[in-house]
Image (spheres, coloured by chain):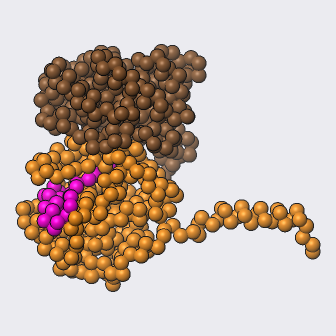
Amino acid sequence: MAKDLSCLQSELLRRQLPCGGWAALVSSAQAALEPTCYSLLAMNTNTGPTIQTALRFLLRAQSSNGSWPVFLGDDPDGSWVTSLVTIALRDDIDAIPARLNGFHWLLDASGKEASWLGRWKFRTTDRHVRFDPDRYGWPWIPDTVSWVVPTAFAILALRQLPCTCGGFEQIPGRIEGGIAMLLDRACPTGGWNAGNGVVYGEPVAPHPDDTAIALLALRHHGEDPAVQKARKYLEDVAPRLRSPWSLAWTILALAAHQRPVAALRAALAAFPELMQTEDTSTLALACLALDHVRSLVSFGVDR
Amino acid sequence: MSLTRRDFLVGSVAVAAGTSVTAPFFWPKHHALHPMARSRVAILKAERYASDLEQLLAAGLREFRVNVRDKRVVLKPNLVDYLPGDAINTHPMLVRAAVEVFRRMGARSVTVAEGPGHQRDTQLVLAESRYQSFLREDRIRFVDLNRDELVRTRLRASYTGMKELWLPRAVLEADFLVSMPKIKTHHWSGVTLSMKNMFGIVPGARYGWPKNILHWKGITESILDLCATVPIHFVIADGIVAMEGNGPLNGTPRSLNEVVLADDPVAADATSARLMGFEPARIAHVREGARFLGNAGPDHIDQVGEMPSTSSVPFRVVPEFQHLHAR
């Protein structure tokens, strides 16, 4: 397995762009922040120069409002990847001011349900998706509502701040609100999808990756019935997963919740054509899942 | 009565303010795109997903005298998510048949491209929807539009009020874009056909899953802005097994046994709507699209092959869209 991991890391290294970042697809030269964050987290400590150029890239890419864009050249309004970048920069002392600015931006960001007008709309005219508009988290981009994945990543990011003083007093409340939102948006059959559990009175199916990311954020809420149901769903679906992206997230989530993952890791390592996968985030996530103990520490999720 | 300089200034400011507030309501929301005077639609009978689809498509395309020689063809199926059953996504056998036919017609390249709107794991959707195996076997290039390289693109209509969107390079560089929707009802827009299918080109990595900004800016408005900006050159709509009821995900499969071909997305959607038992003029984006993107009225559509007939039993829809039923 160690050999598999090192081969995959070599391939990741090969894909790094001269600017220090990684593109989303191997055929692209446009540096994107999500694959860069996963790749940076997936690199081991023997690749010093790679890490340094990646860190510098992330610092250069920060917008003046403290957020990070989705890709280099994107508009500076801010996006969900801000959470991921603050996680990826966690071990870089030079990045502390940038991370703090990122945390401030995250605290100011919220789904449209946070406004009274948004809540009023969802209580009166827009009621086909079942959810409690009083419980909100984070959107993918400004001016949209909260969704499961950006909320889970924001919770993981904000939990990494060592203290809630100096302008960060709202953090516990925002984390609590985000957790309440995640629990509210769970699918009736267990697990999560993007955030629509019931539409027009009918349950919508969960997704393995969304469920796994939510479970990482809810690591300390294992007794909650929604979390238990989600874990059961993920354990049931895991052996049949036919994609390395979903399998990698599943391994991380189940490991965080103290579930055995050895067989799943073997299945991931044996995935056909993993090295040739077009999607660099998938490649990086496979590395993170094969090295899950270290990776969970990076995500701030202690086992 | 004498007009002082002060009165004049106050009056001028008032007129300017009034104009700036009201003028946008009167400005046209689209440029004249000069759609074709007449459109062509073919309705092909197909009882099942089988290997003879290739022959069927080849014969249908011959009627249109489509020329894709040396062109980069991009096929955009509808792969929104995966749930067991055939009714959610454009069937892989139809896409495979289309790839083969366009290759034989001399296309420089044929790419399948999609950015699923619900599911972040595109590879999982491809694997579960049985796309992955044929893409590999036939060496067909697939581009994940949720993660492709992005180009800032000025919108060519202004229904949403958005000036621009980041759109994937693979679609913008296509010489011949084929929208391949699944014929379905949709709980937010009434139907999802070739025009609504264009939501899949909006990149999830930039705008999220689902592409929530389009919902906030208005689904009808977003469809029109997208279709004005990225022209659809041809439509191959999968209505062999369609979907009715609470689409696009939780509806019921409905055998329609038809494949709809068209050289105009508005004509394709109007015809598909008629096949579903709907009145096209009651579908907001079809009605508005007929003003500048294509033709919806039967008088401007030349029918190739079978004539469209309204479904003897119209497709079921959620209560908000009962008014779509033709009476």
Residue in view at x 22 percent, y 55 percent: B111
Q: Give the drawing colour for chain A.
A: brown
Outermost residue toward the right in this view: B1
How far across and how far down the image is residue A193, in percent? 31, 39
Dividing the picture into quarters, in which one does residue B73 lie?
Answer: bottom left
| Quadrant in which the C terminus of chain B appears | bottom left
Outermost residue toward the bottom in this view: B299
Give the tally of numbered discs. 0
User: The chain drawn orange is chain what?
Assistant: B
How far across and how far down the image is residue A178, in percent? 44, 30
Query: In the rendered view, does A152 fall on the left or right side of B131?
Result: right
Residue in view at x 72 percent, y 64 percent: B16
How far across and how far down the image is residue B117, in percent? 32, 49
Q: Would you say residue A172 is visible in this rendering?
A: no
Residue B296, magenta (yes or no): no
Dividing the picture into quarters, in which one does residue A37 lie?
Answer: top left
Does B248 appear above or below A8?
Answer: below
Q: Would you say residue A269 is visible in this rendering?
A: yes
How far across and how far down the image is residue A126, in percent? 45, 51
Does B160 appear above or below A214?
Answer: below
| Quadrant in which the N terminus of chain B appears | bottom right
Residue in view at x 42 percent, y 34 percent: A81
Residue B114, magenta (yes or no): yes
Residue in view at x 50 percent, y 28 percent: A102
Outermost residue toward the left in this view: B51
Residue closer to the observer: B145 or A228: B145
Query: In the rendered view, does B159 fall on the left or right side of B275?
Result: right
Range of magenta residues: B90-117
